[in-house]
Image: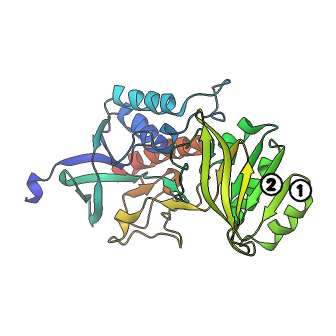
Amino acid sequence: MSDTEIPKHNVIVVGAGPAALTAAIYTTREDIETLLFERGVIGGLAAVTDKVDNYPGFAEGIEGLTLANNLQQQAERFGAVIELGEVLTIHDEGEYKRLETTSGDMHARAVLIATGSDYKKINVPGEQEYYARGVHYCATCDGAFYRDKKIVVVGGGNSAVQEAIFLTRFASHIDLLVRGDHFRASDVLVKDLENYTDKITVHFNTTTDEIVGENNEVKKVIGTDKLTGQKVEFEVDGVFVFVGLKPNSEFLASTNIELDEIGFVKTDTHLQTNMPGVFAAGDIRSGATMQIASAVGEGATAALVMREYIEGKL
């Protein structure tokens, strides 16, 4: 296909989560033609979250799928087009960026990477079955549902210790399951953990083998004491898994777009990557807070700076 035959767009957004959809709302309202590519679920992680309780403006909370659908409908009302497909890589060709996609090559004057991230899974029976119904990956999002209840936290790094401490605001007791014989968390966090021994019991050398439930509710976690080889069980109401986040940035491996050591996209103060005309917003961006409200704000900011870029003002 020659350059003249490659479809040209003003803005192509890679992803269709809260940051992407918000950006599309802003660009299309200003008559900037916008195409979004989504390879999975429209709405991203928000769409598969049972209830979002900390998004401003919804006093009683809102179902994640409802919030995602509302964002999609709003973006489409202003003219955004969402295509189910995948962007395979991005090439810098000056004024236009060329995107290889599952629908063929496409040109865009500006590109927004908003592919988000995914929670690393422990891949045990019951984890997927009870996702958002007793199995969670975000303490800030879902911790309040476990007021005066017992929970298990899985992980031994900074996020596991930090989030376990946060969850003491709600839970009556927390069993912290650490696969290794020591924490991988910083000394400061480990020292801080000592102040919560009344609520947190640490179990080193303990694997998480199965999450068991009934009637759509988690009832217990089955693990193994690696030192004795014996099975151990924890009667709980919920499980929080904190073994890291996996950025959805694999498609950037063949580009020169700069990533941090984990794989999140680096940007400047204008949310622009080191490839001119390519921006990033939301959970995929290095330094992001991993909150829906923040992603929405970054999406709006990205739309405004992309408009400036297209107009030659950036």
- Under mark 1, the amino acid is Tyr
Task: Give the spatial CA distance, label 2 vs label 1.
Answer: 7 Å
Q: Relative to residue 132, is residue 99 depicted above or below? A: below
**Residue indicated by mark 1:** 196
User: Relative to residue 221, is residue 272 drawn left or right?
Assistant: left
**Residue indicated by mark 2:** 165
- Under mark 2, the amino acid is Ile
Across and down, in percent, residue 295 comes to 54, 45
- Provide the secondary structure element on which disc 2 rests: helix
Assign the C terminus to one quadrant of the image: bottom left
Q: Relative to residue 29, is residue 134 depicted above or below? A: below
Across and down, in percent, residue 81 comes to 29, 36
Q: Nearer the viewer, residue 237 or 106?
A: 237
Q: Nearer the viewer, residue 35 or 133?
A: 133
- Colour approach in the figure: rainbow
Q: Residue at x 79, y 51 (%)?
A: 174
| Mark 2 in CB contact with mark 1 (< 8 angstroms) | yes
Label drawn at residue 273: none
* Disc with the residue nearer the chain's start (2 vs 1): 2
Q: Quadrant of residue 80?
A: top left
Q: Residue at x 48, y 63 (%)?
A: 265
Disc 2 residue crowd, few under 14, some 14–19, many 20+, Cα 10 Å: some
User: Relative to residue 192, is residue 112 drawn left or right?
Assistant: left
Assign the N terminus to one quadrant of the image: bottom left
Residue 136 shows in the view: no
Residue 2 shows in the view: yes
Q: Residue at x 58, y 28 (%)?
A: 62
Across and down, in percent, residue 213 comes to 61, 41
Across and down, in percent, residue 267 comes to 50, 62
